[in-house]
Image (cartoon, helix red, strand yellow):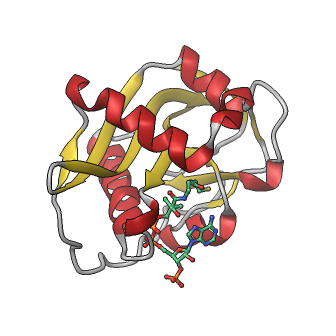
């Protein structure tokens, strides 16, 4: 047994631009946005190796004047025995940051994981950013490659523990 379900902070006011589900037509723009945000180095990451083998559970997009300004993807995984999704990459266009769009996308992911009745959300990211949404350290989640374990975080939805091998569902 482990951490209690997260108390997710109440929603911020909705930022301009509605969230849409990613469609195949968004894929090229999402890839370009992610490449601009992270650079080519991301392809060496353990997280990317996991995403290559997992299936896409959902993706969310934000557009402004027909242009993609934010995106996030969720991948179907197991974290030990916990049915979960792996969140990432999340990216917001540089010119649109710090207006709440990233938070809007993270909350859409949390709502989606709840709707799918999953046990939680796993990610590798910056704790100072993701802790505000209720993500907690997950020191016992074992990713399939080298990773800074301090950046492995879990958003609990049920009591299931994020303990054990992380792998495609
Ligand atoms: C991370 C990212 C998606 C956040 O998008 P955003 O729309 O700016 O997010 P929000 O508006 O909800 O939140 C902005 C706040 O988070 C802070 N923040 C952003 N990235 C952060 C990070 N990596 N660590 C800590 N704080 C961060 C900002 O300083 C800002 O703080 P403020 O509200 O005190 O001004 C965006 O900065 C981005 O695309 N970064 C490049 C890609 C990336 O690093 N993604 C993964 C992060 S681990």
Q: Is residue 63 above or below residue 31?
A: below
Residue at left offset 39%, top offset 25%: 56
Q: Quadrant of residue 19?
A: bottom left
**Is residue 120 visible from the viewing direction of this image?**
no
Residue that extends furthest to the top in the rendered view of this protein: 53
Residue in the foreground of this view, choosing between 96 and 86 = 96
Whether 139 is drawn above or below 21: the answer is: below
Vertical placement of residue 137 versus 61, above or below: below
- Residue at 75% across, 24% down: 144
Comparing 157 with 150, the one in front is 150
Viewer-proximal residue among 63 and 148: 63
Q: Nearer the viewer, residue 21 or 152?
A: 21
Q: Residue at x 24, y 23 (%)?
A: 24
* Residue 78: % across, % down: 56, 28
| Residue at image point 23% right, 49% down | 67
Q: Report the side of 30 relative to 153 (left or right).
A: left
Splitting the image into 4 quarters, where does residue 58 fall? top left
**Residue 82 position within the rendered picture, expressed as x and y whole percent measured from the top left:** 55, 35
Lateral position of residue 89 relative to residue 163, left or right:
left
Number of labels in the image equals 0
Residue 50 shows up from this direction: yes
User: Is 41 positioned to the left or the right of 36 in the image?
Assistant: right
- Residue 166 x/y as whole percent: 66, 28
Give percent across and percent down for residue 77.
53, 27
């Amino acid at each position: 047994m482990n951490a209690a379900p997260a108390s997710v902070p109440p929603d911020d006011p909705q930022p301009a631009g509605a969230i849409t589900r990613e469609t195949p037509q968004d894929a090229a723009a999402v890839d370009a946005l992610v490449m601009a945000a992270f650079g080519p180095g991301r392809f060496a990451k353990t997280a990317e190796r996991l995403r290559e083998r997992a299936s896409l559970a959902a993706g969310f997009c934000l557009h402004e004047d027909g242009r993609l300004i934010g995106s996030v993807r969720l991948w179907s995984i197991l974290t030990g025995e916990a049915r979960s999704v792996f969140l990432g990459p999340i990216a917001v266009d540089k010119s649109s940051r710090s207006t709440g769009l990233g938070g809007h996308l993270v909350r859409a992911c949390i709502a989606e994981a709840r709707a799918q009745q999953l046990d939680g959300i796993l990610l590798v990211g910056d704790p100072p950013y993701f802790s505000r949404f209720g993500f907690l350290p997950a020191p016992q989640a074992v990713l399939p490659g080298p990773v800074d374990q301090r950046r492995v975080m879990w958003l609990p939805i049920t009591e299931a523990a994020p303990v054990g091998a992380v792998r495609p569902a």
